[in-house]
Amino acid sequence: MLTASRTATALAVLATVSVVALSGCGKKEVANAATAPNLPKVAVVKVEAAPTSLFTELPGRTSPYLIAEVRPQVTGILKTRQFTEGADVKAGTSLYQIDASTYQAAYNSAKAALAKAEANLVSADVRNTRFQDLAKQNAVSQQERDDAFATLKQAQADVQSAKAAVQAAEINLGYTQVRAPISGRIGRSNVTAGALVQQGQAQALSTIQQLDPIYVDLTQSTTELLQLKRDLASGVLKNAGKDAAKVKLMLEDGSEYAQEGKLQFSEATVDPNTGTVTLRAVFPNPNKQLLPGMYVRAVLQEGVRQNAILVPQKGIARDNTGAAVAYVLGEGNVVEKRKVVTERAIGDKWLVADGLKDGDRLVVEGIQKIKPGQPAEIIQPAGK
């Protein structure tokens, strides 16, 4: 009986010790769990420096390649209009017909005067020949011979004058047909049949514009132009060669124009009112999609930036002062805050001029959860 009692007591003591031991282990695990660090999870991208072609986007307006105002060269009553407004015309095409009756009469009169002068020339030539022969025989005086020769020369001059008058009358008669000075698209007519038109009048009859090819006049600030020259001179940018002269065009609706243009010249003077210079590009326009006066944006290739740093825009934040900052993971995945200088946006990325280097691990997701000097846990890299 005593032995059984002792055995029961020993078992009870062991059970109590076990319970206490288990209870102690549970508290230790809870304590360890409570003190374990809860690291913020972030996604990073590796910063890589690579050659990048840089482009400048400039505003511009289209203007016709050639433009000519149709004006009358003679005065008269307009009889007919011989073109369709808004149509394409070729150089030399008759556009208007001016009443030609008075000019036809003047031409006929000039031709008659020429015939009379030519007849007088024949008579003067015969008389001069006769008097020259008689003078050799001393049958006429020297004065008579000289007078006959002078009459011949005057008759010859009269013929030349009459020929010039015929030519002038013929030109004026031809001007009664008002022809297209250039090929292109003609606009609306400012006059109708029956109107009196005058040589040298202020109002043009119509206007013709050549639209294929077409000019695009662009404006660039002198600040951008000087920075571009400095970058090229220092070697930061390398000239893109012959491709640098090529220009792409964005239309008003945001679409890209199918044809590629070429940069022709840069104006040598600066507009004192705007501080800009004008660049002119020429574009093929076979379908007449571009019309004069359209607002467009041109994309010009500046050059190639060696070791350019391009990072996703979501990886660049702003501090309380508005300065651009970036968060990178250093040794031990410790967060570092850096001030950066962003030069321009290229698509969905920033071109970073300073603050980041090749090989940096840039935080692009989870920026709100991290603080400088604290470690972070990298999850699956962004974009994968």
Image (tube, rainbow, N blue to C red):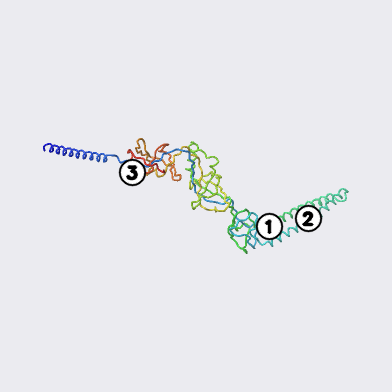
- Nearer to us of marks 1 and 2 is 1
Is label 3 or label 2 in front? 3
Q: What is the crowding at mark 1: few (fewer than 14 residues within 10 Å), some, or many (at least 20)?
A: some
Q: Tag 3's secondary structure?
A: helix
Q: Give the answer, above or below, for where 353 lies relative to 126.
A: above
Q: Between 158 and 73, which is closer to the camera in this rendering? A: 73
Q: Which mark is residue 174?
A: 1
Say if mark 3 contacts mark 1, CB within 8 Å: no
Q: Amino acid at mark 3?
A: Lys
Q: Position of residue 306 (x, y in %)?
A: 48, 37
Residue under label 3: 369
Q: Quarter of the image holding residue 384?
A: top left
Q: Give the CA distance from mark 1 to mark 2.
A: 25 Å
Q: CA distance from mark 3 to mark 2?
A: 108 Å
State the CA–CA distance, disc 3 to disc 1. Answer: 86 Å
In which image quadrant can residue 178 be found? bottom right
N-term mark: 3 or 2: 2
Residue tagged by mark 2? 118
**Quadrant location of the N terminus?**
top left
Type of residue at label 2?
Answer: Glu
Q: Where residue 107 sits in the image (x, y, percent)?
A: 72, 59
Q: Position of residue 111 (x, y in %)?
A: 74, 58
Q: Residues within 10 Å of mark 2 (few under 14, many from 20)?
A: some
Secondary structure, mark 1, is helix
- Mark 3 and mark 1 lie on one chain; the one further toward the N terminus is 1
